[in-house]
Each structure stands twice: as C-alpha cells, then as structure tokens.
C-alpha cells in the first residue's frame, strides 16, 4: 500500500463546494454580498376603454349560469358588467373607472335572463390569448337619473 496522506480539508472541500448553494438557499450560510444597482420599476399608465366600442357580445346561458364572450381587448381589467333594463344595453366597467358600451342590444327574450342572475363569466382578449373573468352583473335603469350620460349612448343604439 502506498502512503498517501490526505488531509481532512482536502476531503471536506469538495463537499462544501457541492452543498454551498443548498446551504445558501435554505439560509444556513450567507452569500457574499454583491453590489447591485437598484432598478426602479417603471410605472405603466393603464388606460381603460371608454365609451362605445366596435364589438358585439355573444351571450350563452345554461341553467343559472351566464357567459358573455367579447372579441375585444380592453385596456384595463373588467370589474363588473352593467345591464341597463330600459335600454337593453350592456356596458363593462373597468378597474380605472372607464366604462365601455357594447353595440349589442338585448332582445326581449334575453332580457329576463339578465334579471335572474348576479354573476357572469366574461371572456375577453389579452393579445392572442383569451381570459375569463368571473364578475358581478349589475342591473340599472336609465330612468333613475335623467342626467345620466350613458342614456345618450343607449338611445343612439336603440334607434
């Protein structure tokens, strides 16, 4: 046999090198401090879609569930859908306060379906992808407020 002397440090060094990333990951060892310049996130202004939009909605209903599919990309996240009882008109309120009004005017047959539900599946676009939102459906009446700006949009559509 040869007389090869191996020190303890030589045996432990490969193990330390191997396990060091795991020790750092689980917080048992401190990683050497690296100088990193702070990068401030750039705030992007989100602009919602406001007013009458050039998109129609397709409505599907099964039992007590309703879905509204719109092939349109809103600039902001939809928060709720409003249905005007008097004008039979659908509008979509967005997170930043913008309200988009659809070209779709409901028929007399579809109107009771909207009155009997309070939640809606809304399918919209984000780029090439579809996204489904589960959002509240609110009923409103144009006759409640004579100075309501949305009445003008609805009357133009109803003609």
Image (spheres, helix red, strand yellow):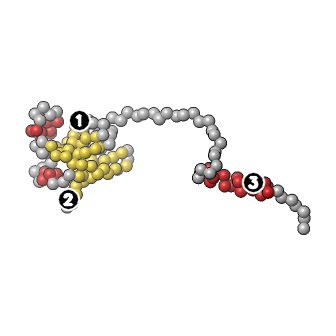
For residue 101, which quarter of the picture? top left
Check the picture and name the quadrant holding the C terminus.
top left
Select label 2 or label 3 by which is in front.
3
- As drawn, the label of residue 51 is 1
Question: Which tag, 2 or 3, sits closer to the chain's start?
Answer: 3
Q: Residue 31 carries which label?
A: none
Q: Mark 2 points at which residue?
A: 64
First along the sequence among labels 1 and 3: 3
Q: Which residue is drawn at 66% across and 55% down?
A: 19
Q: Which is more toward the observer, 27 or 146?
A: 27
Instruction: Identify the secondary structure beneath mark 2.
Output: loop
In the drawing, does residue 100 fall left or right of residue 28? Answer: left
The residue shown at (22%, 37%) is 52
Which quadrant: the N terminus? bottom right
Number of other residues with Cα within 10 Å of mark 3, as a class: few under 14, some 14 to 19, many 20 or more: few
Label 2: how many Cα within 10 Å (few below 14, some 14–19, many 20+): few
Q: Residue 48: image x %, image y %?
A: 31, 37
Pointers 2 and 3 in contact (CB under 8 A)?
no
Residue to which mark 3 is pinned: 13
In this rendering, does residue 76 appear at all?
Answer: yes
The residue shown at (37%, 44%) is 127
Residue lying furthest top in this view? 147
Question: Which type of secondary structure does the marked residue at label 3 adopt?
Answer: helix
Q: Distance between the Cα atoms at labels 2 and 1?
A: 29 Å
Estimate the x, y position of residue 56 in percent, counting from the top left.
23, 45
> How many callouts does the rendering have?
3
**SS class of the residue under badge 1?**
strand
**Picture coordinates of residue 104 (x, y %)?**
19, 45
Q: Is residue 104 left or right of residue 126?
A: left
């Amino acid at each position: 046999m040869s007389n090869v002397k191996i020190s303890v440090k030589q045996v432990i060094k490969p193990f330390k090198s191997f396990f060091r990333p795991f020790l750092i990951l689980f917080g048992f060892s401190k990683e050497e401090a690296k100088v990193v310049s702070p990068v401030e996130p750039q705030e992007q202004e989100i602009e919602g879609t406001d007013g009458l939009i050039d998109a129609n909605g397709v409505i599907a209903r099964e039992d007590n569930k309703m879905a509204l599919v719109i092939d349109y990309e809103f600039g902001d996240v939809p928060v709720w859908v409003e249905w005007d009882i008097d004008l039979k008109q659908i509008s979509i309120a967005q997170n930043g306060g913008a309200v988009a009004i659809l070209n779709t005017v409901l028929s007399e047959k579809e109107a009771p379906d909207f009155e009997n539900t309070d939640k809606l599946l809304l399918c919209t676009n984000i780029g090439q992808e579809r996204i489904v939102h589960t959002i509240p459906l609110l009923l409103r009446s144009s006759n409640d407020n004579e100075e309501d700006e949305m009445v003008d949009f609805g009357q133009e559509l109803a003609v």
